[in-house]
Amino acid sequence: MPLEYLPLIFFFIALFYSSVGFGGGSSYLAILSIFFTDFYEIRSTALLLNICVVSMSTIIFIRHRVFNFRLFWPFLLSSIPLAFLGAQFNLSQQIFFLILGGALVLSGLFLMLKFLQHTIESKDFLNHKKFLLGGFVGLLSGISGIGGGIFLSPVLNIVNWANPRIIASLASVFILVNSIAGLVGLQMAGTFQINYDLIYKLIIAVILGGIIGSYLSSKKFNLKFLGILTSILVFYVGIRLILLHGFGIKI
């Protein structure tokens, strides 16, 4: 598939993910890993596009006072420095793609749970558990280029930690701050790399997709089927990367 189709593909990715409170980093990484082999460029591009998509939803949540800093600060306090640290890891290409493959497999599973979840008994998290969970997801987001909301949100939804709108606001802010921290980490490490001929087209595509996705979300448009298909795609690409870079098996 030629690169000219990437903006269109990313438009639909942003449209879907923004409708459920995510940035789309896992799918950006999945698609970019098919077209590119420079893992620094893959990480940099995915984090930058994450920021473009979730910035709008973050502003909306804050303006409507859905985002509650008192509930969220432990997640953010631990995730931001670890996302910054994770982005500075100098990994070999093989190790990076193995980590990315594992992250995509988890993303696919968590995204599937997001749409097929069976809520269990409501459970609150003490601050130290929020701190640990936020830190782990933040570190993974910095290393892989995924904002982390796709890991955090399904877990909190499944345990019925708060209502879905509050969790979505946390996911948006979480993705935004960790993506920014990750980009700063890449810049500090000298590994921030962007294809400037392509990135502007992708930014325009994801912003448009994010706007439309936010509108569909406000209208409660049912995107469950598309979400399940996306989770299968992300899971497949993750398995493909693990087999290819871990065992030399092409599928």
Image (tube, helix red, strand yellow):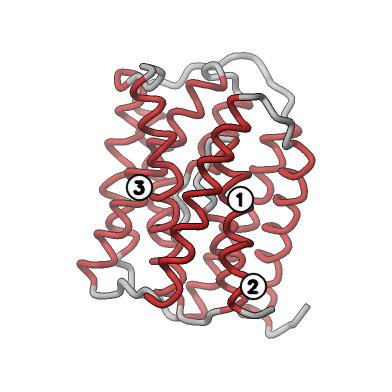
Q: Amino acid at mark 3?
A: Asn
Label number found at residue 165: none
Q: How much space separates mark 1 and mark 3, taking CA atoms?
A: 16 Å
Callout 3 environment at 10 Å: few (<14), some (14 to 19), or many (20+)? many
Residue at horizontal 46 percent and vertical 70 percent from the top: 42
- In the visual, does 230 lie left or right of 68? right
Q: Residue at x 47, y 50 (%)?
A: 207
Q: Nearer the viewer, residue 14 or 97?
A: 14
> Residue furthest toward the left?
188
Which numbered disc flags the more N-terminal residue, 2 or 3? 3
| Separation of marks 2 and 3 at Cα, in angstroms | 24 Å
The tally of labels here is 3
Residue that carries the numbered disc 1 in the rendered image: 107
Q: Which mark is residue 241?
A: 2
Q: Which mark is residue 178?
A: 3
Give the SS element for disc 2.
helix
Placement of 3 over or under 233, stated as above or below: below
203, above or below 113, in the image? below
